[in-house]
Image (cartoon, helix red, strand yellow):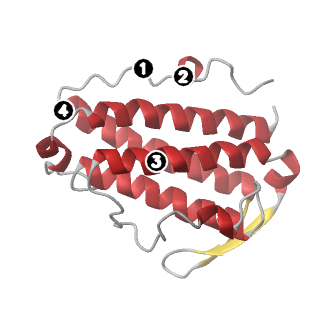
Amino acid sequence: MSLANNFRMMSHYNQRMNDQLLNCCYKLSVADLNKETHSFFSNVISYWNHIIFGDLIMLKRLGLNDIGGLSFATFANFPEPKSANDIYHTTMSELLLLRQQLDEVIVQCFADLNDRDCLALISYKTTEGVAITKSVADFCQHLFNHQTHHRGQLTCILSQLGVDYGCMDLPIIVPEGSGN
């Protein structure tokens, strides 16, 4: 299986799951969106902002390494990620728009990715200042795993709020698969 094809499939899964869960959250009351969750992040709004933070910082690292057609200009209209607790927006309508724009960048980035890119090494500093060098494939796996991890936490919160968020199975969400 082509690594690049697998990441393209994951970019579509990522986009479709974000849409599915954002639509569920969009229907929640302001009180439920801001209700203390007693979990890793304090409320639903904070979870969405953190997922956006993770994507912004990781995609910018790819762009700084000329991977996936990303460049400095790609992020000109996006917020600057500074901290894992950044709050970019406090309403679902604003978060929905930013999330959809960011997911388009992710889909395009992985449409432009090739297997040679996946084998390349990238270097960057963490938010704590630690220098890291990883293969692009390992780095991209983390990008998708980060979202999946926090969406899993969100689905637990949505379940506690009585929300049916639907199927999350990869073969159902991306029936076209990886193109192999």
Check if mark 1's residue and mark 2's residue have beta carbons within 8 Å.
Answer: yes
Tell me the element at label 3. helix
In the displayed structure, 23 sits above or below 93; it is above
Check if mark 3's residue and mark 4's residue have beta carbons within 8 Å.
Answer: no
Q: Which mark is residue 99?
A: 3
Q: Which mark is residue 173?
A: 2
Check if mark 2's residue and mark 4's residue have beta carbons within 8 Å.
Answer: no
Decide which of 141, 158 is in the foreground and name it.
158
Amino acid type for the residue under numbered disc 3: Arg
- Which is in the foreground here, disc 2 or disc 3? 3
Amino acid type for the residue under numbered disc 2: Ile
Question: For the C terminus, which image quadrant?
Answer: top right
- Which is in the foreground here, disc 3 or disc 4? 3
Instruction: Check disc 1 and report the residue beneath it.
Output: 167
Q: CA distance from mark 3 to mark 4?
A: 24 Å
Q: Residue at x 71, y 65 (%)?
A: 71
Mark closest to the chain's N terminus, 1 or 2: 1
